[in-house]
Image: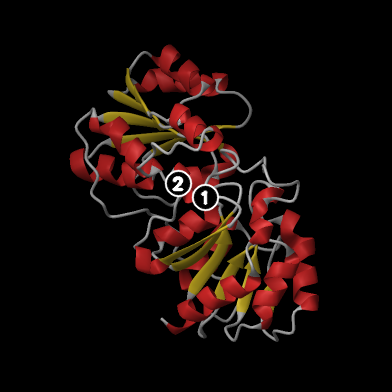
Amino acid sequence: MKVLVIRFSSIGDVVLTTPILRCLKEQKNCEVHYVVKKKYLQVLENNPHVDRFHTIERSVKKIITDLKKEQFDFVFDLQNNLNSFRIKRKINSVYFTVNKKNWQKFLLIYLRWNVLNDHVVDRYFECISKAGFHNDNKGLDHYLPSDLSVDYDISKSFAVWCLGASHHKKKLTKEQIVEVCNGMVTPVVLIGGPNEKAIAEEISKKTVHPFVTNLCGSISLNESAYLVKKSAFVLTNDTGIMHIAAAYQKKIVSFWGCTKPSIGFAPLVTPEKSKMLLSKKSNYPCSKHGKYCRYGCRGCIKDIHPQEISKVVAEMSQS
């Protein structure tokens, strides 16, 4: 059986499709093809459950001819947008489309009526279940090159702190992070992209913690994931690294302001490994992706008190 999975972006969303890929391969030995934006290929390129990637740089038009030739038995659209619809319409295969539950998200965000009671991974499995697949409940996957290493001493216990997020309103401030670092004993590695490099430098200068290492903007996503895998625990905003940490079943302290776990993107680990700290402003999300905050321009994640974070970090360090 030859199948096509469509999920264009982004890091976390692509990681969340990995249980689907595993079950497609293990339950019916499918030949699995995957459509993804080229910039996110690195998230999956070492995954043994994908036989071929079809990458998009600018337009889906350039890959449709190749996709038509494959003659897929099934197409699983886990993106559900206009571009994925174009692919399904053009290649003429039997397809199933994920229910993104946007109407339920609208009710939750704007009317504060929560009728969502599932995880996004459950929604993906609802999609492929129509073709006879089922959830094996083995969680997320993430695979790294076997020869990968990072110039950091992983022989001693350390924590990873991911500073990045898709929107500024989803990020903690440097003041919050510095205060928490000041009370930590465990060495801390700061990771993130080039956008986080400046704030990480300020954190490194202002903290009294003697073992804070700034690697923001200087290592790749795979190298960041490697450090996550080797860490004792991970501190992170609601972002892709959080889901990579979940794939490695790490202990995770996650921070939530404008977005909330109730939308369906909580870390997919056991409750013992996940400590989710939510802004006290509201139990409800301000927006679907965290771009808008109903409580101010800075984002309500900034109201999470450093002492609250420090308490949870201390518990994680001892467990």
> Looking at the rendered structure, which numbered label has been put on residue 262?
2
Q: Is residue 151 visible?
A: no
Say which quarter of the image contains residue 311.
Answer: bottom right
Looking at the image, tell me whether mark 1 or mark 2 is earlier in sequence order.
Answer: 2
Which residue is at the front of the view, 267 or 28?
A: 267
Residue 16 % position (x, y) = 42, 46
Eye-nearest disc, 1 or 2: 1
What is the spatial separation of the Cα atoms under label 1 and label 2, in whole angstroms? Answer: 9 Å
Asked whether the beta carbons under mark 1 and mark 2 sit within 8 Å of each other, the answer is yes
Q: Which residue is mark 1?
A: 283
Residue at 47% over, 42% down: 263
Residue at 77% over, 63% down: 199
Amino acid found under the numbered disc labelled 2: Ser
Residue 151 % position (x, y) = 62, 75
In the rendered view, tell whether residue 259 sits above or below residue 244. above
Say which quarter of the image contains residue 301.
Answer: bottom right
**Horizontal side, residue 264 vs residue 24: left or right:** right
In the rendered view, tell whether residue 313 sits above or below residue 145. below
Say which quarter of the image contains residue 247.
Answer: bottom left
Q: Residues within 10 Å of mark 2 (few under 14, many from 20)?
A: some
Quadrant occupied by the N terminus: top left
Q: Is residue 232 visible?
A: yes
**Horizontal side, residue 111 vs residue 193: left or right:** left
Residue 265 % position (x, y) = 46, 47
Quadrant occupied by the C terminus: bottom left
